[in-house]
Every structure is written in C-alpha cells, then in structure tokens.
Image: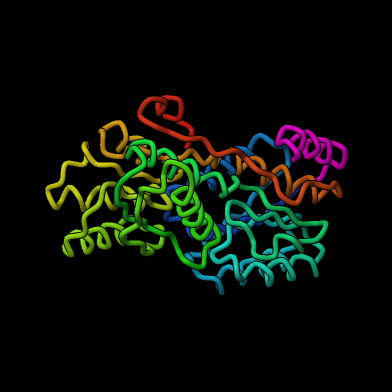
Amino acid sequence: MIKSSLLALAAATILSSSAMAAKIGVSLRVFDDNFTTVLRNAMADYAKTLPGVTLQNEDAKNDVNKQVSQIQNFIANKVDAIVVNAVDSSATPQMTKLASEAGIPLVYISLQPSDIDSLGPKAAFVASNEADSGTLEAKQVCKLLGGKGEILVMEGQLSNQAAVQRTKDIHEVLATGDCQGIKVVAEQSAEWDRSKAQNLMTNWLSKGLKFDAVIANNDEMALGAVLAMKSAGLDTKKSIVAGIDATQDALASMKDGDLKVTVFQDAAGQARGAIDAALALAGGKTTDRKIYIPFKLVTPENMQNFAKSN
C-alpha cells in the first residue's frame, strides 16, 4: 500500500518540476449526503494547499447516466485526471473504458468499482476496506448483546458494493464464535437514506417485530431508525443502534445516548489519498491499484477522539 504522504510528495514533485496547472474532474454520486459532503469539502481544502491544482466538482444526483455524461464532459474538457465516487459499481467498467481510451488517469473513491481487478495502469481505487467496516460494527453489537438476541439489519443500495460487503460482514460475524446466538429477524434496504430508514423502521415497529438491536450499513439509516423509535415512544437510550461513518450527526446522537456504535471512515484521508493518486498518475508515476485508509471503531468511550474528524 502506498502511503498518502508518499503520494503527496510525488504529486508535489510533479507539479513543481513541470510548473503546470493540474485540473481534476470530480464526480460524486450525490452532494446531498453527509459523507460525500465531507469528501467534497476535504478534496477542495486539500487542493488549495497544492499549487496549481484546481477541481471541477459535479453532482451525479444518484443518476448513473448523468455520471457517465460527466465523465465524458471531463474528457472533452481535457482534464488531467478524474476522481469518481460511483453511483453504481456495475457502471464503472464503462467509465473506466472512457477514461482509458482518452488516456486520462482515473481514481475511484470510496465505492469499489466492479472492474477493480482490470483497471489498468492509469487507474486506482482509494477507500477504506469494507471487509473491516461491518465486521467492527457487528462485533461490537455482539459484545453489547452478550452474543444473544435478535437484530434488524438496514442495508444501503443493493447495487452498491459497500452495502453488499457490509451486510456480508454482519452475517459472517454472526456465524462465528460467541455471536452465533444472534438472529437476524428482518433485513431490508433503506438506500442509505435517513427518511427512508425512518419509514422502514416505522413499518417494522407497526408489524410488532421484536428486536434487541438495529445494525445499519451507514449512520444516516441508523439515525432514521432512532427517529422512528423515538416517535414510537421507545427509550433509545436503552436501545442498541449501530451505524457506519462517524458523521458529526452520528457523534451528536451518540453523545445524547441514542447511537451506541459507529465506525469511523476517514473521508478526509480518502480525499487526500484520491487527489495524491490522481496527481501521481497524471505525472506518469505508478500507484497501487488499491489504497486503503483504515476504519476505526467508535463507541461512547472514545467518541471524543473523532469529534471533528468527519
């Protein structure tokens, strides 16, 4: 794994030696999301520290066709590199092909592309290893439950690699060791969305489902579950709800005693890593195909360490 600091040094060397501006096209799956907002702001802040580097940010609005069109526009505008937070991992081969044929470096951020093993020499993937995210989350919930109980699982978009992997992590944890006494009583997608998660949780509660914990693929859905539980008169301070991302809203909920578990995904670290990789590739350097920024478990006991991280 190439460290971000080394990539930054390579990028700085490229820029200083060539004395040329570097324009990077950035397409994010949606601006109206806490995590992608942190990604966008962190990339913008980091780019300001790199002389001659400018970003062209575009909102794909969760539309695959719009995102592909944005890639085509970046190519037409002759950007030096492209960074993509994909709407749908199944659409990445088309975007990879477009960038490759144009000879423009492409860096995927956060969501693993489906063609990860065939990206080619001018492409890379920067993220946190999703095999760790749901695993850390589920193990902590298992610990809090003492290895026994019934849980509800809220999934992200089913076409999204991160959602698939995080849910897989949960089931793998529950199938091993001291966690085999935990049963999943309901599992459904709320598409990463707080409002949809609130509606889903309300529906589950109206059906009288009995549960000891809620495990969500991200914080937004976890917070939606908390809202529904409060509306139903449940004591969320005595409940176990878990998410992933450690957003500021999630940490505020944890401080209030509602959210019990989240997992820090270093959006700022991913943002810096993606820009570094894009600049290195644009300068003819090589990078690892996969560059991972570690996940970290967040609980009420250590949450103060992450107060201003995302």
Identify the residue at image location x=21%, y=53%. 228
Find residue 170 and report its horizontal and vertical position in percent. Answer: 45, 51
Q: Which of 75 and 172 is in front in this view?
A: 172
Q: Identify whether 299 is placed above or below 278.
A: above
Left or right: residue 266 versus residue 19 is left
Identify the residue at image location x=48%, y=41%. 136
Q: Nearer the viewer, residue 166 or 270?
A: 166
Identify the residue at image location x=54%, y=39%. 295
Left or right: residue 146 versus residue 273 is left
Q: Does the magenta stretch include residue 304?
A: no
Q: Nearer the viewer, residue 117 or 75?
A: 117
- Report the residue that reaches farthest toward the bottom: 65
Find residue 19 and report its horizontal and vertical position in percent. Answer: 83, 41
Is residue 176 visible to the viewer in this orientation of the structure?
yes
Identify the residue at image location x=80%, y=51%. 282
Per the picture, the main secondary structure of the magenta-coloured stretch is: helix
Choose top left, top right, bottom left or bottom right for residue 120. Answer: bottom right
Is residue 36 visible to the viewer in this orientation of the structure?
no
What span is in magenta? 1-20
